[in-house]
Amino acid sequence: MGRTLAEKVWDDHVVRRAEGEPDLLYIDLHLLHEVTSPQAFDGLRKSGRRVRRTDLTIATEDHNTPTLDIDKPIADPVSRTQLETLRKNCAEFGVRLHPLGDAEQGVVHVVGPQLGLTQPGMTVVCGDSHTSTHGAFGALAFGIGTSQVEHVLATQTLPMAPFRTMAVTVLGELPEGVTAKDLILAIIARIGTGGGQGYVIEYRGEAIEKLSMEARMTICNMSIEAGARAGMIAPDETTFAYLRGRDHAPRGTDWDAAVEYWRTLRTDDDAVFDHEVVIDAAELAPFVTWGTNPGQGAPLSASVPDPASFEDASERLAAEKALEYMGLTAGQKLRDISVDTVFVGSCTNGRIEDLRSAAGILAGRRIADGVRMLVVPGSVRVALQAVEEGLDKVFTAAGAEWRHAGCSMCLGMNPDQLSPGERCASTSNRNFEGRQGKGGRTHLVSPQVAAATAVTGHLASPADLADVPTPVEV
Amino acid sequence: MEAFTTHTGRAVPLRRGNVDTDQIIPAHWLKKVTRDGFEDGLFEAWRKDPEFVLNRPERRGATVLIAGPDFGTGSSREHAVWALQNYGFKTVISARFADIFRGNSLKNGLLTVVLPQATVDALWELTEADPTAEVTVDLVGRVVRAEGVEAPFELDENARWRLLEGLDDISITLREEDAIAVYERGRPNWKPLTTQGA
C-alpha cells in the first residue's frame, strides 16, 4: 500500500524501531528561543552532557524582546535575565544565536524558513507549539516541551509515539478577498480545537497548491490550534522556487540531488488517510473569531452566536463563558464590534506578504480616531525588506506604529500588551483569555481584515471600505 | 523523574473544557529559568475569583484534578505541568488531553489519565457532593477507584513502564548511541547545517 507524505518523512528518520516501543526519530533541525530552553540547558549541565549536534541547532530571541527602544537595556529584569541566560547557554554550549539587535533576529518560525534552513522532508522541532509552521515546506515539524528540548540537545533524536493521518482537501479556488488565514480559521471552526488530536494533517487540493509559501506557512502554523501534532503541504515548484538561492539551501549538484528527493515527497495515489475532510473553497469568506478559543469563529458577515444554539453541553458552556469574557451579546453583528487596537504581526502573519497586503489597504487612508495599530515585522529581514519597499512609510502615514521585529502582542511576555477590557483585532493565532494581556479581548483576523478594521474602527473587510478613499498601489 | 505507582487523594472538580495552557500558567510566569516556584501562577486569572473551586477551603491539599475535555491545549509550555506539580497535583483526569501537554506530563511524572466523559461526570458529582471523597489512581492496576467508581484506563505499556520506574528518557536513548551514529553517517550531505552556508 502507498504511503502518505507524513509517513514517508517519518520512515526516513527512524533511527531505531522496536516492538512495543516508540520509534526513535532523528531530528534534522532544532530551533531554540529563550523561553523554553533554560531548564533544558540546566539539565544538560547537571548531568554533564553536551549538545550532540550544534551544527543542527540555532537560537534566536523573540518572545521577551521589546519592539521599541531595542538599543536600551531591557526594562523588565526577569525578561532580561531570561535573554541573558540564553546568551550564556549558547556561548557555553557552542550554539549559533541571533540575539536582539542582530540582522538575523526575529520570530523563530520566520527565521528558519527565510535562512533556507527549513527544507522539504526534514524533521524540525522547537520548544514552541507553532513549529508546525515549517510543515509548509513538506517538513515534519512539531512543537515539543522542555524535557524534549533537553532530549534533542543531548541526543539529536526523540522517541515518538505513532500518529494518525488526516487529509484536509480544499477544492476549487479561494474567492477574491479570502486569504489563507480565513481558510485556516474556517478549518479550525469546522473540525474543532480537538479535532486534529493525534493527527498529522496534510493540506492538499487545488486551493492549497495555488498558495504562496507565506500563505502555506500561515495555514500550517495554526494546525496546532486544531489540536494536530503537525500540518504539512507537499513540496512543489513553489517550494523549490522559494528555497533556491537562500543562505542554507543546497547549491550546484547538491541542489539537483535534493530536488530529486524532494519530488518523491508526495502522498502516493493509493495511500489511505485515517480521516478525510473536504472543504469547498468557493464557500469561504473573510472569517473572524468571536470567542476565547480559535475554534469559536464565524464569517465576518455573521452574528455572535447564541450559546443556546450549541447542542453539545460543553460547547454551550464554553460559548457562554466566552461571550461573558469577550463582553459580547448573542445576535450582535460581528461587523458592529468596535476595536481599540489592531495588531499585525506574529509567526502566523508577520511575513513580508502579510505586511504588503495590509499596506495595500492602508495606502492613502488613515486609521480611525482612537484606534491604535501596531505593525510588527516577523524578523529583521522582513523589516528591512518592508522598508526597502516603503511599506513602513505607508503604515506610519496611516497612523500606525511601525515596530521592531519580535513576537510582540501575540502573547503577554513583552511590553506589548492589552489592558483589561481592551479589544483587539489581531493577526496572531490565539484568542485565549488573557493571551494578549490580562483581561484583553482578542479577535483573530487576517492582515486584510486587520487593516480594514483599523480604518473603520470596527471589524471589517476591505470590501467594506468602498465608501472611504480608494487604496493606492504601493 | 519522580516514579508514579499509585496515588490516593482528595480532588478538585474543574468543570471547564478546553482549558488551554495560557490559563494553566499565564505567559508572564514563563520568564523564570527554573522548574520550580510556579505554584502561585497556576490558574492565576481564575484564582482572583474567591469562588473559584481551587480557592475553596475544602479543596486545600487536594492532589487529583478532574478536568473537562481538551485539557492543556495551545502553547507547548512545560511550565503548565510544573505549575500543576508545584501546586501539589499528582494526577489529572480528563476525557481528552492535548498531545503536547500529555507528552510533557508523562515526562515529568504527572500522570494524565483519560477516562470517558461519563466517568468524569460521575467523579465530578461525587467530589462536588463530598469534598472529602478520595480518588485513587492506580497505575499498577491501570484503574481509577472512588466511591461507586471503578474505571480501568489505558496507557501504552512503554510510557507506563517509564512512569512506574521513574526512568530518565535521555539515559535510555543514550544507550542507542551507536544506532544514532550509524544513522548520521547515512544522512545525505546536502542536508543543511546551521554552521555553514550563511
Image (spheres, coloured by chain):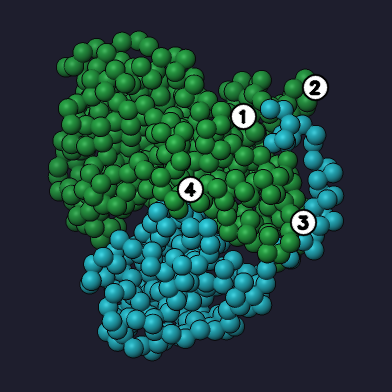
Chain colours: A green, B cyan
Q: Chain of mark 4?
A: A
The residue that label 3 is drawn on is A16
Q: Chain of mark 1?
A: A
Residue A50 x/y as whole percent: 74, 54
Place residue B104 in its image quadrant.
Answer: bottom right
The residue that label 2 is drawn on is A253
Vertical comparison of B2 with A136: above or below? below
The quadrant of the image that shows the N terminus of chain A is: top right
Label 4 amino acid?
Answer: Arg
Query: Do tags 2 and 3 sit on the same chain?
Result: yes
Q: Closer to the observer: label 4 or label 2?
A: 4
Upstream in sequence: badge 3 or badge 1: 3
Badge 4 local density, few (<14 within 10 Å), some, or many (20+)? Answer: some
Q: Closer to the observer: label 1 or label 2?
A: 1
Give how far apart the Cα atoms at labels 2 and 3 are. Answer: 30 Å
Mark 4 secondary-structure assignment: helix
Label 2 amino acid?
Answer: Thr
Which of these two is toward me, B146 or A122? A122
Residue A408 x/y as whole percent: 40, 39
Q: Closer to the observer: label 4 or label 1?
A: 4
Mark seen at residue A115 = 1
